Amino acid sequence: MGYVELHAHSAYSFLDGASHPEELAFRAAELGYEALALTDHDGVYGSLEFAHAAKLVGIRAITGAEVTLVGGSHVTLLVESAVGYASLCRLLTAAHAGTRPKEGELLPPALDLALLAESSEGLVCLSGCARTGLGVRDSNAAVELARAFGDRFYIELQRPFERGDARRNALLRDLATHTDTQTVVTGNVHAHSLRRTALQDVLVAIRHRTSLDGSERERRGNRESVLRAPTELDELFPDDRDAVRRTVELAARLEFDLTAELGYRYPDFSDGTEPAIRQLAQVCEAAFADRYPPSNSLLLEQARRRLREELALIDELGLAGFFLLHWEVLELARECANEVRGRDSPRRSLPPGRGRGSSVGSIVCYLTGLSHVDPVASNLSLGRFLNRELSSVPDIDLDFPRDIR
């Protein structure tokens, strides 16, 4: 029938998870898992490490996080796509935004429920764990999220062998029926093996600043927080085998690959009225007459041809946003220089930064102020700085003066 664990914590869930991401990945492969989700508390701190380890052992890593809501309830968020990863990162940023209201004071992360409902694109939401899950603590809020997420919302069933397991799961099944949502089984894993559960107990005691005896109520009893073999879940949930099977179906939807889909993209400046390449051309054109006066017609013609060719290459390589971003940084530095030096200072005319190295071979850099060397007059080649065989973005060193840093 199969099972995929969709709720697991590593040591990046500080003083809670007892195993490294790699240990979870390696153990999952040993147990025969095809995929495994890492859902650390309020962050994706170990996700990339986990994704690389999972790829190494031939299982698929699912990216996610267990997020704390305002009021203390938890939900489990899983990433479907690159859009979903962006949504998750924005939500985590919002959750952490109020954690340091003043110096020396630290508050726990908390995400507003309404913001989660508004920013759900590309995410799957599970109702949370047995102790602090939203489905257990606030069924009305769970109904609200079920409306917002639609078929991307699932009720989470767990069996930690604690008092009230049967009653809690019965209520959660009723909630699933009421919200017309489906259930999935999860293990709320905090250790990759039984050997590590003793350490997990110690971590919980440390977190609560008490002894092992004093933390008995907070600890995960019966050592049920271990990553189980997929075949064990049928026996553990004999009345919910559809919910066990559904984890495999859901995992198939969660296609996002953190190791392959997260290449950095420079801003495309799509908020402007013109495409980025057109905006860059306009910046260059605004400076062209000052840099190349009409008195030297030969140099002017060469510069025009060079600019057309270079802009075409930049457009082909999709780097217009890269140059516009550097130009904006330089303009910001110019404003800072005027403020620091004073608008009437003789040093006001000094450039706020100067490019060096291979960037001086670019006429676009020259016209945008990123370089102070005329590549046309100096007969400099563009090839070292920008060409079709580039394996990475060009390198521009601006070297801001010390007085405006």
Image (cartoon, rainbow, N blue to C red):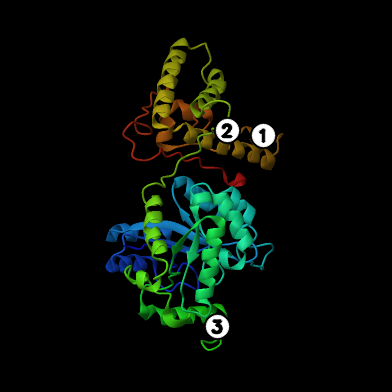
- Residue 123, position in %: x, y? 49, 51
Q: Is residue 257 left or right of residue 94?
A: left
Q: Which comes sooner in the sequence, label 3 or label 1?
A: 3
Pointer 1 residue: 346
Under circle 3, the secondary element is loop
Q: Is residue 382 left or right of residue 342?
A: left
| Res. 351 image quadrant | top right
Q: Residue at x 53, y 50 (%)?
A: 150
- Label 2 is placed on what type of residue? Asp
Measured Cα–Cα span from mark 3 to mark 1: 71 Å
Measured Cα–Cα span from mark 3 to mark 2: 53 Å
- Residue 59 is marked as none
Measured Cα–Cα span from mark 1 to mark 2: 37 Å
- Residue 84, position in %: x, y? 48, 49
Q: Residue at x 57, y 33 (%)?
A: 271
Q: Residue at x 53, y 31 (%)?
A: 369
Q: Residue at x 53, y 66 (%)?
A: 172
Which label sits in the foreground, 3 or 1? 3
Pointer 2 residue: 271
> Relative to the observer, which residue lies in front, 260 or 323?
260
- Label 3 is placed on what type of residue? Arg
Under circle 2, the secondary element is loop
